[in-house]
């Protein structure tokens, strides 16, 4: 199993190009199931999760061609309504094939999904929403079995905002008869990106980016050619790296409007951040100021950046309080950061971080995708060598991260 070795203490400098967003690419690639013909997607990141979803789509009958960051998918021959456990267990986003399969083939049999062990992420709202559109739902032997002769528009309220739940019901409602209204819908930029793609395919959706989304069903959709939006979490991770190492780097191909919460918090720590169109330049401060933060659904501070900011607070001046309100198990990385010398106390969903003068390199174990990134960041600023084990999590969501950091001047290498 691969591991990454980081020698800390180096300053970073230069430009880094941000890849396409994994969390936007996955539902957008899956939306190809809703139409016949060839859909073309550009700026698709080369990640394990992307490879997994392409394998799943191929299993369902889609034809896929990949050239660099361009992926073409033709789902005209869609014939298989079953997404088996072996293909679904690695990635939670696989549940997103449920609604397109019901919409296209009138039935679906999808294994309950896997993914990172960061807390309970039930799919009950997906199923309740699909049932409200007229589908029959059963759970048998670890599989969701859904069927409907046709889907019919309805009004559905999410008890809590859910990104994948909103995406799934969007892909059901676009081909349903009548009007569907989703209330308390997720508002993330990845939701807006999916809606923009569906509308280009011929859907009639209004309200994306707000908590109320209205979908007027259409008889069919057409193929589309689109580009995937930049990954705001990858961009935020590199920004934290610059702040940690007191460096000066520039991020290319960003969407600063998607990152306002992160930018605001980084400025509070003392970093100098300049927005240059689609690029962001960040200079880390000599003294990192401690701040408090609470994770919240978008437009609040993203839970996917909590671990990275915790590393930054580990070497800040003073005390900081980090509250995690999205996932209950998302402090698993704390034990590994303590191995590096961080002073962190956890009480319930709150972590109290007391800044230390320096972290010290040590072998650590990655527990999930974003925790993996946080350990890489810690290694960049720690004294000595940090060995990050089990980095297969990292490869699910960061494209060639060691190469990108290497080009910025970091002493980092992958050991296979």
Image (tube, rainbow, N blue to C red):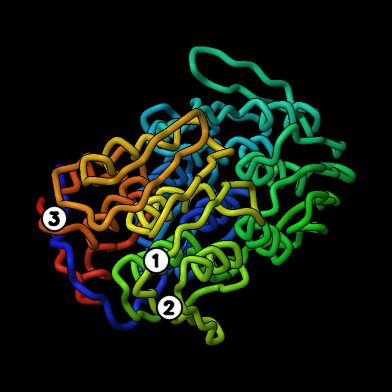
Question: Of discs 3 and 2, which sits in the foreground?
Answer: 2
Tell which residue pokes out farthest to the bottom in this image.
276
The answer to which of 166 and 34 lies nearer the viewer is 166
What residue would you read off at disc 1?
288
Residue at x-position 59% and y-position 16%:
139
Name the spot of residue 259 as percent of width and height, x first.
Answer: 57, 66
Question: Of discs 1 and 3, which sits in the foreground?
Answer: 1
As measured in the structure, the alpha-carbon distance from the residue carrying label 1 to the one carrying label 3 is 25 Å
Name the spot of residue 288 as percent of width and height, x first.
Answer: 39, 66
Numbered badge on residue 5: 3
Residue at x-position 27% and y-position 70%:
404
Name the spot of residue 41 as percent of width and height, x first.
Answer: 51, 66
Q: Are marks 3 and 2 in contact (CB under 8 Å)?
A: no
What residue would you read off at disc 2?
282
Name the spot of residue 53 as percent of width and height, x first.
Answer: 43, 46
Q: How many marks?
A: 3
Residue at x-position 49% and y-position 82%:
279
Q: Is residue 128 above or below residue 16?
A: above
Q: Is residue 372 left or right of residue 63?
A: left
Nearer-N-terminus badge (1/3): 3
């Amino acid at each position: 199993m691969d591991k990454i070795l980081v020698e800390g203490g180096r300053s970073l400098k230069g430009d880094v190009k941000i890849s396409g967003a994994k969390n936007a690419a996955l539902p957008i690639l899956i939306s190809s199931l809703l139409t016949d013909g060839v859909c073309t997607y550009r700026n698709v990141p080369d990640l394990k999760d992307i490879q997994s979803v392409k394998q799943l789509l191929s299993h369902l009958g889609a034809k896929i061609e990949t050239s660099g960051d361009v992926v073409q998918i033709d789902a005209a021959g869609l014939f298989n309504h079953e997404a088996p456990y072996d293909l679904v267990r690695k990635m939670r986003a696989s549940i997103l094939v449920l609604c397109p399969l019901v919409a296209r083939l009138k039935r679906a049999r999808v294994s309950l999904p896997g993914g990172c062990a960061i807390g309970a992420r039930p799919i009950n709202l997906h199923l309740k929403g699909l049932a409200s559109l007229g589908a029959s739902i059963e759970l048998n032997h670890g599989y969701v079995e859904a069927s409907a002769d046709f889907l019919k528009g309805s009004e559905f309220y999410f008890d809590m905002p859910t990104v994948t739940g909103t995406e799934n019901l969007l892909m059901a409602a676009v081909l349903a008869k009548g009007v569907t209204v989703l209330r308390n819908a997720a508002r993330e930029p990845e939701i807006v990106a999916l809606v923009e793609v569906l509308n280009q395919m011929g859907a009639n959706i209004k309200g994306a980016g707000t908590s109320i989304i209205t979908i007027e069903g259409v008889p069919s959709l057409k193929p589309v050619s689109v580009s995937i939006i930049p990954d705001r979490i990858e961009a935020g991770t590199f920004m934290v790296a610059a702040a940690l190492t007191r460096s000066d780097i520039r991020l290319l191909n960003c969407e600063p409007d998607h990152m306002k919460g992160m930018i605001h918090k980084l400025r509070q720590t003392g970093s100098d951040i300049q927005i240059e169109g689609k690029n962001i330049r960040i200079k880390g401060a000599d003294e990192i100021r401690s701040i408090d933060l609470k994770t919240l659904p978008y437009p609040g501070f993203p839970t996917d950046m909590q671990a990275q900011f915790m590393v930054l607070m580990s070497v800040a001046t003073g005390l900081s309080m980090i509250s995690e309100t999205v996932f209950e198990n998302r402090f698993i990385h704390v034990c590994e950061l303590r191995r590096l010398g961080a002073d962190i106390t956890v009480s319930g969903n709150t972590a109290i971080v007391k800044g230390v003068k320096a972290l010290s390199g040590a072998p650590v174990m990655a527990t999930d995708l974003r925790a993996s990134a946080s350990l890489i960041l810690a290694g960049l600023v720690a004294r000595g060598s940090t060995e990050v084990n089990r980095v297969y999590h990292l490869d699910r969501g960061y494209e060639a991260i060691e190469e990108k950091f290497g080009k910025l001047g970091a002493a980092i290498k992958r050991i296979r």
